[in-house]
Amino acid sequence: MLLTITTTHRPATDLGYLLHKNPARVQAVELAFGRADVFYPEASEERCTAALLLEVDPVGLVRGRRPAGEGFSLAQYVNDRPYVASSLMSAALSRVLGSALNGHSRERPELVDAPLPLEARLPVLPARGGEDFLRRLFEPLGYEVVIEAEPDGASAAGLAEWDRHPYLALTLRGRLPLRALLSHLYVLIPVLDNDKHYWVSRDEIEKLLRHGEGWLTTHPMREAIVSRYLKRQRRLINEALARLTSEEEADADEAESEREQEEQAVERTIALNEQRLAAVIDEVRAAGAASVIDLGCGEGQLLRQLLGERTIERIVGLDVSVAALERAGERLKLERLPEAKRRQIELIHGSLMYRDRRLEGFDVATIIEVIEHLDPPRLAAFERVVFEFARPGRVILTTPNIEYNARFENLPAGQLRHRDHRFEWTRTEFEAWARAVAGRFGYSVEFKPVGPVDEQLGPPTQMGVFQP
Ligand code: SAH
């Protein structure tokens, strides 16, 4: 069972200080169920990788667990536990890397909460629930998720053909504090394991709530996570969920989003951003909306303007990025709003990839400069979430017109406006997509240019307004 964590933060060897483990030495820790070694396969200024190798003693693991004669089965001795990243990895994480998990660093306290470029890799993971489940667990936390099949997993584990089930290699990449990564792994690795025979006590609720702090309450898969973490023990699950719902959303990563600044730099000459916001507000007014949900609200530019609209009674901003939502909360100065205004607006963490009842029942949904951030193969999921399930009374959607890029002097030819854009469409491409979506879900669509219209290239931003 192996976990590696890599950073390219400079100097990368700070990772050693954060983990309280010297990169120059191999450190072994004896555990009740085996032993853990921490070592560094690479440790340079540019790149540093720490590895946690867990060797489980399969006999020690079951010895003394159950009274003799009760529930004995060969499966206790012949199992895949020593080889896959299972619940025991969490136990090892907290024993061996407890200080880092709990956010203590004597030598580098300023890095404890700093978002760092991190990559975690679990090369042998039980794939129960499949690839989709893995994505749904980790993507809402802001990770780029890479999953590879592990064809040799079963044979590596020495399992017989009949006991073969697929293993996956999981890589997570993100920019977040190390302690956040460790707490995600601490909670979610046992969730993947889903082994019903594992013993759970009430202490597990405390561990779950402690390590889930700041992210579990708003995770779209919260119920599945709690249920699997507590091994489907109904009473424990109910207690944990009740406590989670009453808990305040607290600490999260404070990743400073560079997105806005960068995109603004490209589009600056024509103050396109302002024109886009004004065009969207005009459409919201024209719709006479009393409730608006801004999907992919980012740092809340549009939300701020919506708050100034007297006829709007309910505003919700949704984003997949916790950091963006935090910034939105700060910029909107939510704490300082008068109570009545404060109650009008809500920021929610969620993903446009998954059906979510919180998105239902709005007069208008705005989706401003968001679709180009979605992977094309996943657009179909997004379309259903918005147009089939949420079904707002009107959808106002904008996206760049790639044809106009030639007019941006500071944008090299062939380059998209932002490095996170997965695509940018021509007018023909956008209109074809929008018409097809409208047709499929029983909406009609109208197109409106935003920004100065170039005779040949069209406007810099294209807008589609959909109505049932
Ligand atoms: N609408 C804002 C932000 C646009 S940037 C504005 O106009 O300023 C795109 C935003 O979409 C980012 O904040 C990003 O976090 C969010 N996003 C990307 N994928 C998402 C998804 N699957 N679900 C919800 N939001 C997503």
Image (cartoon, rainbow, N blue to C red):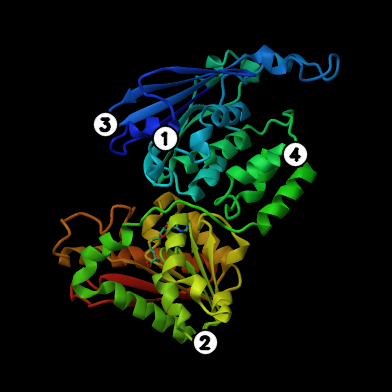
Mark 1 → mark 3, Cα distance in angstroms? 15 Å
Mark 1, ligand 1, within 8 Å: the answer is no
Q: Secondary structure at mark 3?
A: loop
How many marks the image carries: the answer is: 4
How many residues crowd mark 3 within 10 Å: few (<14), some (14–19), many (20+)? Answer: few
Sequence-wise, the earlier of marks 2 and 1 is 1
Q: Residue at x 84, y 17 (%)?
A: 67
In front of the other: 380 or 57: 57
Q: Amino acid at mark 3?
A: Glu
Q: Secondary structure at mark 2?
A: loop
Rendering coords of residue 270 (x, y %): 21, 74
Q: Which residue in the rendered view is the most extreme toward the right?
A: 69
Q: Secondary structure at mark 4?
A: loop
Choose top left, top right, bottom left or bottom right for residue 402: bottom left
Mark 2 → mark 1, Cα distance in angstroms? 51 Å
Residue located beneath label 3 in the image: 45
Q: Residue at x 37, y 43 (%)?
A: 116
Mark 4, ligand 1, within 8 Å: the answer is no
Which of the two discs, 1 and 3, sits closer to the camera? Answer: 1
Rendering coords of residue 43 (x, y %): 32, 26
Q: Amino acid at mark 2?
A: Thr
Residue located beneath label 4 in the image: 202
